[in-house]
Amino acid sequence: MAEEDFSHSNSDRWSQVRQLARIQGWRSWLSILAGGGLGFLSLSGLCILLAPFSVANQVNVLLHTVLGWAFLIPCAWYLARHVLRYWRRPLSHILILGYIGLAVLFVCAISGIVLTFQAAVGTRISYGWDTVHIVTTFAILTFVLIHILLIALRDRKAREAGDTSLVPEAAGHFGRGVLAVTLGSVVLVVLLAYAYRAPLLHNELPDDYSYKYGKDRPFEPSLARTASGQAMDVRLLSGSQSCGTAGCHEEIVKEWEASAHRYAAMDPSFQKIQANMAQQNGPETTRYCGGCHDPISLFAGAKNLFTAVEDLSPVKGYQEGVSCLVCHSVRQVDVKGNANFVIAEPPRYMFEIEFDEKQSETKRFLRDFLIRSYPRPHVNGLSKRLFKTPEYCASCHKQFIDKQINNVGWVQLQNQYDNWKESRWNHPGEPQKTIECRECHMRLVASEDPARGDEQDYNRTVDDGKHRNHRFIGANQFIPALLKLPGWEEQVKLTEKWLQGKQEVPEIAHKWQTGPAVGLEMIVPARAKPGEKLEVKVIITSNKVGHDFPTGPLDIIQSWLELVAMDQQGNVLYTTGTVDSKGFIQPGTFMFKTEPVDQQGNLIDRHNLWEMVGVRHRRALFPGFSDTAEFSFQIPVKPPGQHRAKAQQITFPLTAPPHGSETLHLRARLLYRKIDQYLLNFMFGEEAGLTSPVTETASDTRIIEISESKQTAASSRWVID
């Protein structure tokens, strides 16, 4: 009997010890702090994942990170003590749930630590680790919550069965403490969000704004419009440099800095033409240009008054032209052209639009940390499938004028999109045969940029280690050098290489041929007699150009054929297409160019397209097509000892004549320059001494044997070593 009493007494003592331990556990400030921290981290994590982008949610991200680290030590301490207390107990469903919850909590903590370091010192977080963090958060909510609820349910049943211990009361104390810590953290988020003072945005047009084309069409004659129908503060679309200084998109920003998109508004020729248009037609008409060239000024309502050039582009962000955020904030496009797109306010993070040289390092760090640790609004808001389509480019790379501008009616101007759409490069539904705009003008380059990889493209993967080059290499080798933009030397070099067809694009190499972008071949007889008329044909073929060649404003651009004939001593016998010392092309030159006219039939030669009603001449090459230039001149009969004067500016290698005969050397070159000399002189004055650089895009040479005993021979290429 005594042994039974002792055993019963010992059992009661252990029961009391366990009850006391449970009471202490429920009331422990460490358990309440750990439980409350876990509650807030779980709740805030769900908000980060599911709640809309806002200042409050960004504060939530920061506090989630800070408190996550702050709770690491007390939570680890509590869990260690908790495990030591129960690990020798017999297994039960409650203990198993607890151990599983502990394991996923450990993995969640590790993933959180990794993500914090990646966001703080890296360029982007790992989506793998991010997925682990999200999945383990839901696992914690599942296992830990059920673990706690089962314990609470057990204690409730014990109390209903007559248990008069203080355990249920202690459990209630724990619940109230956890709720207080969780809600306190939530209140802290609200207070910090309220304390943040975002820069005041001015999304309204000026009071004196001219609604010349109607209140409902504030940006016409450009077809560009905002999603809200209102103005957009300059700071919403500018600040491209911050994309590079954050350490994320440094490579892309460096490429963009010398591109035509970047200097679209600061191009001095654009500024001069825009000023001329404002003087003649009024400042409102320059909105027509602003949609593509200067959208930041356009949407800020700046194209309204005019007394000087600066009045039409007065905003700080105009130097960015088509900025990063202008392109990446477009939400809808129409292939009608004339900047027919809809732009929406892009997601801007805390401290982002405050960026300037004087911004504190702390704010800059917080801005970068927020974008990298909370990237979904940034990625989803600025990366769209739309950007990868030719239709997206068409909104600006297709142009017309109508009665609003010329007071007459509709006239088609440059139109790269329809050229491409109707060309051999477009095979709808067959991406392996089609070459689209981005594949040529944004070739893939090896990259460490966070934007590398693209699983949406037909020939790419999410981890291909490449990004689309943002130099947008085209055909302007003049303005980057004139403005001395960062990286202009490389931009000019790549542009000339592109014009010559020498740029390799491996991902589309199987779709087009090697060699010049526009090739030429000279057809001449192999032999000729002195004194007879020589017939020369030059066939120019568009091999690799995805639209007309040349393209763009053909009243400005010039591409022409230069032909030089020399005897074996280097004496010039015939020339056409040469450029004189003042930059003017020889009259009568075979040229690809458009000659637009106004209502009186006068030539549009100052890019005054607002007066254009039609064209009197147009010559360009459609993709895959050829054109032929024909020349003829008399082969001179040269008496012994008589020579013609040499033209010192024309030189090319001469070859020894075969069999002691006289030879005639012919060289044909297809040349290109961005702006004709007359327009340059008009805009900047002849005294400025500006000339547009000339690029040789293709060439061909022939040697003709000149002999009295000429034998008929078919046209052929002579190669003499």
Image (cartoon, grey):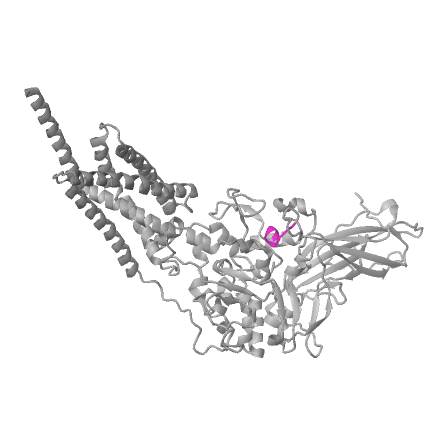
Q: Nearer the viewer, residue 545 or 108?
A: 108
Q: In the image, residue 298 lies at what x, y percent? A: 50, 69
Seen as rendered, the residue at the extreme left is: 2
**Residue sitting at 70 percent across and 58 percent down?**
671
Q: Nearer the viewer, residue 441 or 375?
A: 375
Which quadrant would the C terminus be assigned to in this image? top right
**Residue sitting at 44 percent across and 54 percent down?**
243
Seen as rendered, the residue at the extreme front is: 161
Q: In the image, residue 663 lies at what x, y percent? A: 84, 51
Q: Nearer the viewer, residue 707 or 153?
A: 153
**Residue sitting at 65 percent across and 77 percent down?**
408
Seen as rendered, the residue at the extreme right is: 709
**Residue sitting at 22 percent across and 27 percent down?**
88
Q: Nearer the viewer, residue 665 or 226?
A: 226
> In the image, 678: left or right of 307?
right
Q: In the image, residue 415 lies at what x, y percent? A: 65, 63
Can you say whether 572 is above or below 228 in the image? Answer: above
Tell me the quarter of the picture where residue 144 sits: top left
> In the image, 685: left or right of 573?
left
